[in-house]
Image: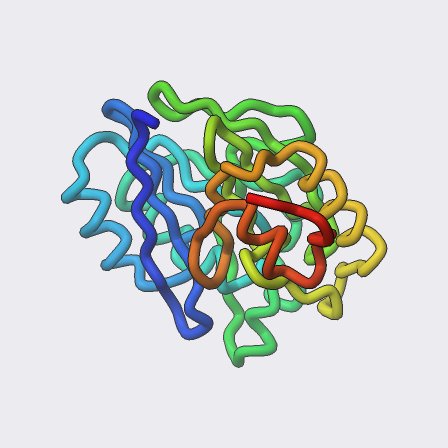
């Protein structure tokens, strides 16, 4: 893998923010807080921040959107069905935390099958509703950013507004069909790990008879 992926744990809910670097281009995935830390690390890595990508529209994944975009000129990408959450504190759950946070409007709405290119890295968009209506995962060669759809040992909550247990189960089934056991998962919370490990330890995935 020619790419470099840095994980930063940001914000009060310990959200994983990732900085993907390939060649001279960077993407910041889920800047959920601590903008100064994110920007400092991006500067250390060098290159141009091409995109800010939100895997979904909750506050703990979008809180630093504005600061990162204003500092870098990056374009904002989000799943098309979650775009409306960016401008609505009730929808993005910031009102539940005593804030009225909004994000800049997205430059590009992502849908199933879209490609996002950062340097030589190409990521395919998989629409994975369940945690939110417009949640997405980004699948690349050897790794995947899975947001709050899939953690190594659990899944995102489905009891927030717009969540759906049925959609989540369908999204997990789709992921299970396309991910190899060697794929490295970079989830929205918790440690990263191979999908093969998730199959063994995650009770929401079918693990009986799986070997790694």
Residue 151, quarter of picture: bottom right
- Residue shown at the point (66%, 25%) measured from the top left: 113
Look at the image and tell me whether residue 57 can be seen. no
Residue 42 location in percent, x, y? 23, 44
Q: Nearer the viewer, residue 71 or 120?
A: 120
- Residue shown at the point (46%, 23%) measured from the top left: 122
Residue 10 location in percent, x, y? 36, 64
**Quadrant for the N terminus in the image:** top left
Tell me: 188 left or right of 14: right
- Residue shown at the point (41%, 74%) measured from the top left: 12
Residue farthest to the top?
A: 120
Residue 29 location in percent, x, y? 43, 45
Look at the image and tell me whether residue 20 can be seen. yes
Residue farthest to the bottom?
A: 98
Residue 68 location in percent, x, y? 33, 48
Residue 161, quarter of picture: bottom right
**Quadrant for the C terminus in the image:** top right
Q: Is residue 27 above or below residue 158?
A: above
Colouring used for the render: rainbow
């Amino acid at each position: 893998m020619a790419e470099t992926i840095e994980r930063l744990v940001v914000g009060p809910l310990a959200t994983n923010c990732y900085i993907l670097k390939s060649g001279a281009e960077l993407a910041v995935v889920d800047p959920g807080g601590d903008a100064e830390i994110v920007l400092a690390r991006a500067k250390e890595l060098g290159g141009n921040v091409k995109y800010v990508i939100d895997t979904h529209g909750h506050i703990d994944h979008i809180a630093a959107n504005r600061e990162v975009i204003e500092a870098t000129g990056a374009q904002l990408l989000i799943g098309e069905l979650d775009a409306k959450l960016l401008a609505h504190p009730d929808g993005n759950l910031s009102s539940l935390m005593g804030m009225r946070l909004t994000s800049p409007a997205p430059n590009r709405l992502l849908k199933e099958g879209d490609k996002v290119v950062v340097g030589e890295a190409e990521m395919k968009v998989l629409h994975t509703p369940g945690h939110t209506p417009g949640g997405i995962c980004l699948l690349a060669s050897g790794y995947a950013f899975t947001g709050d759809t899939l953690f190594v040992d659990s899944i995102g909550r489905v009891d927030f507004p717009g969540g759906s247990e049925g959609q989540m189960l369908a999204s997990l089934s789709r992921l299970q069909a396309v991910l190899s056991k060697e794929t490295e998962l970079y989830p929205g919370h918790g440690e990263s790990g191979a999908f093969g490990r998730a199959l063994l330890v995650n009770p929401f995935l079918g693990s009986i008879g799986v070997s790694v």
